[in-house]
Image (cartoon, rainbow, N blue to C red):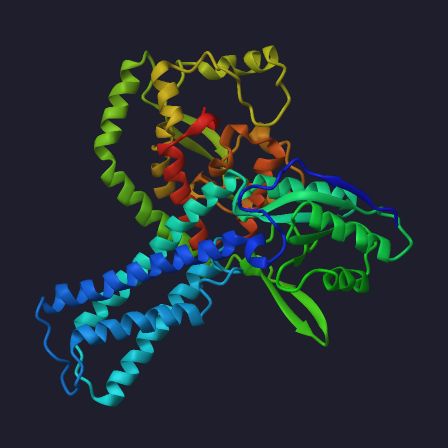
């Protein structure tokens, strides 16, 4: 097995200096945990004492059947709440900053604490104001989740600038190293920064040996890395991976193994050790009647609410489109929907009247004829008003009518034309299992800047891993993309 060592152009930052101790090596983890603790403390104190002040007034009386007063009770409740968040591991380095686990354990810690306190108060016969408790719980929990979200935005911004990341060395075959490095570079918010590569030959016959272990240790020291990621592809046996783990400094350096599974969301993965084997269980995608009913109800309520709230905006936009030139206010284009059925997708007209007749000529002129994603660069058919509508996605608002009609969903795969569907392979046809969406993963992940394969991959990921929480997350990112469209909005 002949290793090839390379260094990624990623010099150590001020957050990654002196690999002598874990505290100096990865100080961002402890600093970030302390930041979250400070936010939690402020939020809990304001929620509990604020609820006491609002519900009971500035002169709170003693708790009935108890020597405590409400101020002391609020102090005890605040300390207990913070302790519960600690016991549940809501600030553990493996939890904070990424994924939904942090939010889930925060909710669990809060609700179970209040449940336990309610039982204790009942058994002790303490006559505590129910309004005081019922006000503290939702306000405090909502504020805690909001505080965690704000901390994550700050952390993600820091990570985009190359700091507060785990410094990772990839170990594996060249193609797998390249694939994993590309995925990690695509998602800097994951907090894994590739700083070096230890390449292994894919057809190697010898096992991991002392020379390679020494080479990896030197690479870890020279690059001040704190994690080794086994990307796969080479002939590494289980004992080889164990030896790599044994060569790392306990508690200071970490071993990560990339399972050769792509486009599978975390909630579908479960690791269960059985007979000494770390078995990974993958739940198959479910499209139950209950899920479909829940998604449809969410679409109806959401679309109806938005239509009602945005009706004045519709009127103003219709007048602007009418003033932009001859032609109808609304533009109807045939798209392929769920199950391959066709429907007329509604938009505010953003082009000159009869623009479709010149599409093929423009594509041929730019050398894009016969390719998917029929996008014309610097399209001359777009009106000045239409260019502004497209930048902020306002031309898409009439699709709320398609959502109410059951032809589209608020969130789903990108609705495409027949000519684009002709490019589908067998895998891509799975995106037609659900209704197309006004917004989706592709819209909030690059829009026009995405290649065809990336757009299809994101749509398939959505279909395979749908959840209501995921829809809410995409909608939140959609509002951000609309308000700050960036350079990918055309």
Residue at (53% x, 18% y) in the render: 376
**Residue at position x 29%, y 84% from top?**
120
Residue 460 shown left or right of residue 3 in the figure = left
Position of residue 172 relative to residue 70, above or below, is above
Query: Relative to 128, is 37 above or below?
Result: above
The residue shown at (63%, 15%) is 367
Where is residue 163 shown, x and y percent of the image? 53, 43
Q: Is residue 484 left or right of residue 424?
A: left
Is residue 193 shown above or below 105?
A: above
Along the viewing direction, whichever of 121 and 317 lies nearer the viewer: 121
Residue placed at 10% from the left, 76% from the top?
Answer: 61
Quarter of the picture holding the C terminus: top left
Viewer-side residue, 58 vs 288: 58
Residue 172 position in % (x across, y down): 77, 49
Could you say which quadrant of the image residue 126 lies in? bottom left
Left or right position of 278 against 404: right
* Relative horizontal placement of residue 152, taking residue 146 as reference (left or right): right
Residue 394, image x, y percentages? 35, 29
**Residue 79: where, in percent of width, then height?**
31, 71
Can see residue 170?
no
Extreme residue toward the right, this view: 205
Residue 475 or 434: which is nearer the viewer? 475
Q: Quadrant of residue 73?
A: bottom left
Q: How many marks?
A: 0
């Amino acid at each position: 097995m002949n290793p090839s060592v390379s260094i990624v152009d990623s010099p150590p930052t001020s957050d990654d200096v002196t690999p002598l101790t874990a505290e100096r090596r990865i100080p961002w983890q402890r600093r970030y945990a302390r930041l979250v603790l400070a936010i939690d403390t402020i939020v809990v104190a304001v929620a509990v004492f604020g609820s006491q002040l609002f519900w009971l007034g500035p002169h709170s009386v003693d708790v009935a059947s108890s020597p405590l007063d409400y101020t002391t009770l609020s102090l005890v409740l605040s300390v207990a709440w913070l302790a519960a968040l600690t016991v549940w591991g809501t600030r553990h380095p493996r939890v904070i900053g990424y994924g939904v686990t942090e939010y889930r354990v925060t909710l669990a810690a809060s609700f179970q604490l209040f449940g336990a306190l309610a039982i204790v108060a009942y058994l002790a016969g303490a006559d505590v104001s129910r309004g005081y408790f019922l006000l503290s719980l939702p306000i405090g929990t909502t504020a805690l989740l909001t505080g965690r979200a704000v901390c994550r935005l700050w952390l993600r911004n820091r990570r985009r600038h190359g700091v507060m990341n785990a410094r990772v060395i990839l170990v594996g075959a060249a193609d797998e190293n390249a694939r994993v490095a590309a995925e990690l570079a695509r998602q800097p918010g994951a907090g894994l920064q590739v700083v070096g590569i230890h390449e292994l030959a894919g057809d190697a016959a010898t096992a991991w040996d002392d020379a390679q272990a020494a080479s990896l240790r030197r690479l870890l020291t020279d690059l001040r890395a704190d994690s080794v990621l086994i990307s796969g592809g080479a002939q590494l046996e289980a004992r080889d991976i164990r030896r790599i783990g044994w060569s790392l400094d306990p508690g200071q350096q970490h071993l990560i193994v990339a399972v050769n599974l792509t486009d599978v969301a975390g909630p579908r993965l479960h690791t269960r050790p059985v007979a000494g084997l770390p078995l990974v269980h993958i739940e198959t995608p479910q499209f139950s009647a209950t899920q479909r009913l829940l998604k449809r109800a969410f679409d109806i309520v959401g679309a109806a609410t938005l239509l009602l709230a945005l009706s004045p905006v519709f009127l103003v936009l219709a007048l602007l489109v009418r003033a932009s030139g001859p032609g109808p206010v609304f533009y109807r284009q045939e798209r392929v929907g769920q199950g391959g059925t066709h429907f007329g997708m509604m938009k505010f007209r953003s082009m000159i009247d009869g623009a479709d007749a010149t599409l093929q000529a423009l594509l041929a002129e730019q050398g894009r004829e016969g390719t998917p994603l029929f996008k014309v660069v610097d399209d001359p058919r777009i009106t000045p008003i239409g260019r502004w509508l497209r930048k902020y996605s306002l031309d898409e608002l009439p699709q709320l009518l398609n959502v109410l009609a059951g032809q589209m969903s608020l969130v789903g795969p990108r609705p495409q034309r027949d000519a684009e569907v002709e490019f589908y392979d067998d895998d891509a046809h799975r995106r037609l299992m659900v209704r197309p969406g006004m917004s989706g993963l592709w819209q909030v992940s690059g829009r026009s800047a995405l290649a065809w394969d990336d757009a299809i991959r994101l749509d398939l990921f959505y279909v395979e891993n749908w959840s209501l929480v995921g829809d809410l997350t995409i909608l939140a990112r959609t509002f951000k993309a609309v308000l700050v469209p960036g350079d990918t909005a055309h």
